[in-house]
Image (cartoon, helix red, strand yellow):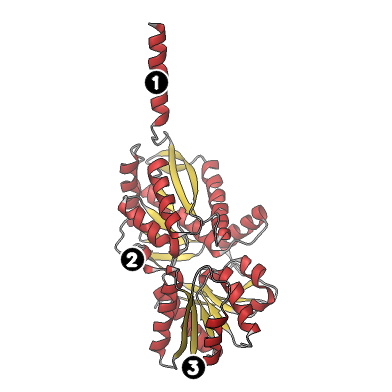
Amino acid sequence: MRRVLTTLLMTTIAMMLAIPAMAADTIKIGFNIPMTGDIPEVGEGSKNAAEMYLADINGAGGVEVGGKKYMLEFVYMDNESKAESAVTAALKLIEQEEVVAIIGPNSSKQAVPGGGTANDNRVPMISPWSTNPNTTLDRPWVFRAAFLDPFQGPVAANFAAKKYNAKTAAVLFDISNDYSVGLAEAFKAAWDAKGLGPVVAYESHGTKDQDFSAQLTTIIKANPDFIFVPDNYNQVALIIPQARDLGYKGPFMGGDAWGTPDLVKLCGEECYGQYFSTHYAAAGATGATKVFIDRYKAKYGAEPADYAALTWDSIGLLVEGIKNAGKVEKNPRKMRQAIRDGLAAIKSFDGITGSSKFDEQGDPIKCAVVVKVANDGSFQFEESVCPE
């Protein structure tokens, strides 16, 4: 009898351990981020910001919901900077880890498919860095902390036309990247609408391409006043030096995917003097933004890029959504619904990347900034552009 009871007890314990239930007094959040692949710095910066936030929240006893405090647990899943891996990572977080919400993916290339998976499985997701409209379009479970390309495209077009007195433009973009395609299209539409002159070359390349001489030769032959490159920083660091080697002496303009210190590490002086639109400028920051930057630099020895700051704001949005839920459900599915409703109830949010109001798609209406890559490699604030 004792052996039978012992066996039953062990079986019961094993079954309890095998059931992935949400631990009491703990709220589990997943992060779908690129810790390897083409843009590992983005994953690293996001994780760094998340760890800072987690230490602050749990160090204060957790998030207060309905008069009780709950600790946060963060689970990081590597999407390898790939679209298909972002889907796999999302499914693992949802099905195996049973998280109640997901932060990320960051880049639109991963956020668009990852957002589809989150929405299909009715799990709230916030993308910190994705600017492609399709990430949230008709997806009531998906939100974001970044402005959209239909806003960013005109920002870049208007600035370049004014700064360079440009009448013609050229575009070079990554045909395999939703972000790059979307921003290229938004820029071209905005440029054409200005009626100053044509986009004289509209060239594409693949994500893994290292040699851009064919596209650049076509562009340079068209003699544009400037070249718009809505690519990730690692590609920009190859494109600009190759353009110079081919004899192009004109300016470049870029989008927010330029915004990491690794751009300068990879590109060096060749990128000095160029401009790009982005989400915030660390130089000259004040208030809570400066506090975040100073703390991040002290802890990690580097200035936080925009995706780190946007991750911080994404977590802040999620925490507000959790608080709005009013109570914590032990059933993950019920808690996911409560958080989604809590996020949808947010009408405005003051973050370190600026103040936002949200539209019916869960997209923030917020300002952009244009920064210059200074001769010391820093990103200097040039101007702020807000929605009309």
Q: CA distance from mark 1 to mark 3?
A: 75 Å
Judging from the image, what secondary structure is the residue with disc 2 in? loop
Q: CA distance from mark 1 to mark 2?
A: 51 Å
In this figure, which residue is indicated by the disc labeled 1? 11
On the picture, is 207 further left or further right than 134? Answer: right
The amino acid type, in three-letter code, at marker 2 is: Asp
Residue 348 in picture, x, y percent from top left: 39, 62
Answer with mark 1 or mark 2, whichever residue precedes in sequence: 1
In this figure, which residue is indicated by the disc labeled 2? 359
In this figure, which residue is indicated by the disc labeled 3? 167
Q: Nearer the viewer, mark 1 or mark 2?
A: 1
**Residue at image location 62% in from the left, 56% down from the top:** 296
The amino acid type, in three-letter code, at marker 1 is: Thr
Q: Indicate the quadrant where residue 298 lies.
A: bottom right
Instruction: Judge the density around disc 3: few (<14), some (14-19), many (≥20) Cα neighbours within 10 Å.
Output: some
Answer with mark 2 or mark 3, whichever residue precedes in sequence: 3
Q: CA distance from mark 2 to mark 3?
A: 34 Å
For residue 377, above or below residue 8: below
On the picture, is 339 further left or further right than 212? Answer: left
In the picture, the quarter occupied by the N terminus is: top left
- Is the residue under label 3 in contact with that under label 2 (CB below 8 Å)? no
In the picture, the quarter occupied by the C terminus is: bottom left
Residue 89 in picture, x, y percent from top left: 44, 50
